[in-house]
Image (cartoon, grey):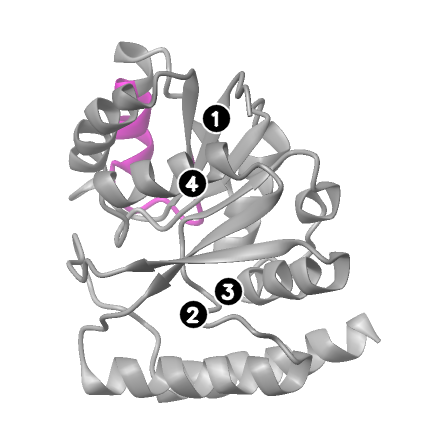
Amino acid sequence: MNVELVSIVMPVYNQADHIGAVFEEYLPRLGRLRMPYELLPVVNGPRTDRSLEICREFSGRYPAIRTLCVDEGGWGRAVRHGLTQARGDLLCYTNTARTTGNDLLLMITYGAIHPDCVIKANRKIRESKLRRLGSLLYNLECRALFDLAYWDINGTPKVFSRSMTPLLHMGSNDDLIDLEFNVLCKREGYQVLEVPILSSSRRSGKSTTGLQSAIRMYRGAMKLRRSFR
C-alpha cells in the first residue's frame, strides 16, 4: 500500500505528568516509517491539569502534531472526534498510557503491509491477577454475546484503512467503542490480524479495568447487542 498519510489518534485525559514523554518517545520511532504521519492528541473531559497546554506546546514545535480538544469526557468520544478530524488514508487509535513507541511502530507497519486487514493488539501480560481476571471475564462475555473470534477486545493500537467506512461511524462515547469496533469488523467481514504485544509497563496511574468495571461493561455490551439486532 502506498500510504500517503498515517493518522494516529491519541485520547488524552489528565495526562500532564507523562504526555510530553509520550511525544518524545513516539516522534523518533515514527520517523522510521519513511511515510508521512500526523499525531492527533485529543484532550477531553474536565481539564484539571496542563495536558492541553503541553499538547499545544508540542504542536507549536512539531508540525506533525495537531492538538484537538473536546469539552466532554469519554474514551469513545475522544476516539470518534479524532477520527473525524484525521486526514490520513491509514488510521490508528491507541491508549498512550500503555502503548510504547516500538509497539506503535510495529502495528502501523503491519497496517501498511496489510491494507485489506484490520490490525489490533492482543496484550499478553496484565499488571495484576485481578486485572487479568476482569479482562478475561469481559472478553469471554463479548465472545459469547457476539460470537467473536477475537481476544483482548480493548487492546490497542488498532489500525485500519480509511476505506473501511463503517469504522469511521461508530457511535459509542465510552469504553464500549472497542467492542463496537470488533463487532463491526465481524459484521463487515473484515479480516482481523491480532498482533501479540508483550510489553506490560504503564506510564502513569492504574488501570480501571477490574471486576466492577467488567460488570458495568457487560451491561453495556448487552445494550449494544440489542442495538445490533
Q: Is residue 48 magenta?
A: yes
Question: Which comes sooner in the sequence, label 3 or label 4?
Answer: 4
Tell me how far mark 3 sits from mark 4, CA to CA: 25 Å
Disc 4 is placed on an element classified as helix
| Residue 158 position within the rendered picture, expressed as x and y whole percent measured from the top left | 47, 49
Location of residue 129 in the rendering, given as x and y in whole percent from the top left corner:
21, 86
Name which quarter of the figure residue 161 lies in.
Answer: top right
- Amino acid marked by disc 3: Asp
Which of the two discs, 2 and 3, sits closer to the camera? 2
Which residue is under mark 2? Answer: 152
Q: What is the spatial separation of the Cα atoms under label 3 and label 1, in whole angstroms? A: 24 Å
For marks 4 and 1, give the one nearer the viewer: 4
Residue depicted at 61% across the width and 75% down the height: 148
Contact between marks 4 and 1 (CB within 8 A): the answer is no
**Mark 3 / mark 1, whichever is N-terminal:** 1
**Which element carries disc 2, helix, strand or loop?**
loop
Callout 2 amino acid: Asp
Report how far apart the C-alphas of labels 2 and 1 lie in the structure: 24 Å
* Residue placed under numbered mark 4 in the picture: 110
Asked if residue 67 is among those painted magenta in the image, a careful observer would answer no
Q: Earlier in the sequence, mark 2 or mark 1?
A: 1
